[in-house]
Amino acid sequence: MTASAGPLQQRAEVLSRKQIGAYHILTLVAPGVAERCRPGHFAALAVGGPESGMLLRRAFSIYRVRESGTYGGTLDVVFDVHGPGTAWLATRGPHDIVDVVAPLGRPFALPADQVPCVLVGGGYGSAPLFTLADRLRERGCTVHMVLGASTEQRLFGALEARRSAHSSVVTTEDGSVGVRGRVTDVLSEVVGRSGAAVVYACGPMAMLAAVAGVAEAHGAWSQCAVEEAMACGIGVCMTCVLPVVGDDGRTRMVRSCVEGPVFRGDRVRWSDVGTIPADALGAARGGP
Amino acid sequence: MPSPRDVDLRVDLAGILLPNPVMTASGCAAAGRELDAFFDVADLGAVVTKSIMLDPRAGRPTPRMAETPSGMLNSIGLQGPGIDSFLGQELPWLARRRARAVVSIAGSTLGEYAELARRVGSSPGVSAVEVNISCPNVANRGMVFACDPYQAAKVIAVVRRDVPRGVPVFAKLSPDVTDLVGVAEAVVAAGASGLSMINTTLGLAIDPGTLRPVLGGVTGGLSGPAIRPLALRCVWQVHQAMPDVPIIGIGGIKTGFDALAFLVAGASAVQVGTVIFHDPGAPMRIVAELRDELSRRAFTSAAQVVGLAHTPATDSLAATDLEGLRTP
């Protein structure tokens, strides 16, 4: 990685914060960051201000970037309030300062050929999929989107999906909009109908596991962006590990922040996430 | 008042000369590479690498961390690539970058510590060795070597034997003991050149949803500003008992003033740890802030303040303009 491609740390000014359904979109002025971002990268935000007792950064996938404009480059992150840190972010407004480190992680791998692709998002996990859809369409790929959530309020970007993709399907668990059920209930049909070569997904771990399975059953590659809890986001703390099979067939506990967050779905040992598999490199031998 | 630029930050730490007293803490900077995106790691006093073991180690299951008030619990379990990979890749990288490397080692047995000391001691580019005898996230948690003066001394003795004379050996101590000075005296008698204080203290967090421990490893090490007063007390006590033993102060250092507080309590250098997760640029920010903190108090060097808090207060400080310095 060259220095110019690495992450930057900036005290970013908030340009705006909007509420959409259950979620917030925070737009930060971060010159230099936008130019480095590719779909699937994420940003780590410090929360609570300079005297904060909340030490750990909150990681969010990057929704949109604008490379230049009146205010210089900006980046958008989408978040849901589910603790004091995100509650603090939800009170930020124009001219407030948020310390941001971005871009982080490995982005989605793009196909070399013009192939059909299916993009799957659970909840606001769909956030990084819209710039991904743009890049894929620029390359001549056909893009199909499947977005799901528990309720309509918790869907993110259903309207945008209709603009970004050649086709889109929406599911809600309560049936408030779209097909009643989960993304995985319709995914097999969409992947089959589209003849997808790659399935991209971002959302909860269980959804990613199911998506990886569907892709594999159809002979498609899958690129899954995981949402593992992180303390630092930059590769130094070793908290965000999950078991992933390497090119050599060995399972290693790898950091989702620097070796991910995007992994090949067939390489992640989904059912072993949260454990240290006995055959993982360096697993305790001879006993529990 | 000296200009911040004129403040001499160099310190002599058990015979090694550091350009400034600020290092990264073991386990909070990996082997330095990731932080190089945020500042030049060669500008640090030293990079203390994550504790390395003989063999690759997968560590403990996730969740491995829980945020706590002004701190965090971690239960990593010394995940690492093993000594071969470390010496083959990480250490040469630090040497190429001309960073000073303090290599932290951790073993499960005396034999492993001895082997690690031999391997690290015979490698070029090692400024010092830090012996982690106090990681709480290993199999015998709570029963770490550093909790028993006799066991702690045995580890230090085998390491000292195999590390060349010119390379200082620091013992990293746990605060989870009744008689910290007793442990400190034992490891110094066994050959430790200095002491790194403190490692994390054992803690627990409960998940409000499941009403079960948050961490996969159940208990974890508490770190961050939450433990700073505990760490300062440890440094204070040990410096008072053994004023000539070099101490590296560690525990929740977030600002230049925090670093200064550890120096005056008796530390010759400090390590910045958990705060890196919050602010990856923190170590070099703290170097700059320490320079300012010394300058505004009319000090010309970092070395001159080491242990200052143990001497009676004089009017010399009051004579300086300390407006605004009372509540840092």
Image (cartoon, coloured by chain):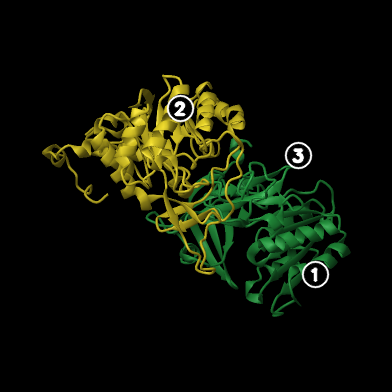
Identify residue type, mark 3: Asp
Q: Residues within 10 Å of mark 1 (few under 14, many from 20)?
A: some
Helix, strand or loop at label 1? It is: helix
Position of residue B238 relative to residue A63, above or below, is: above
Residue A227, percent from left and from top? 62, 57
The green one among the chains is: A
Position of residue B150 relative to residue A101, above or below, is: above
Res. B158 mark: 2
Mark nearer the N terminus (1 vs 3): 1
Mark 1 vs mark 3, CA separation in Å: 34 Å
Res. A186 mark: 1
Identify residue type, mark 1: Val
* Mark in front: 1 vs 2: 2
Q: Classify residue B285 by image quadrant.
A: top left
Identify residue type, mark 2: Val
Q: Residues within 10 Å of mark 3 (few under 14, many from 20)?
A: few
Q: Residues within 10 Å of mark 2 (few under 14, many from 20)?
A: many
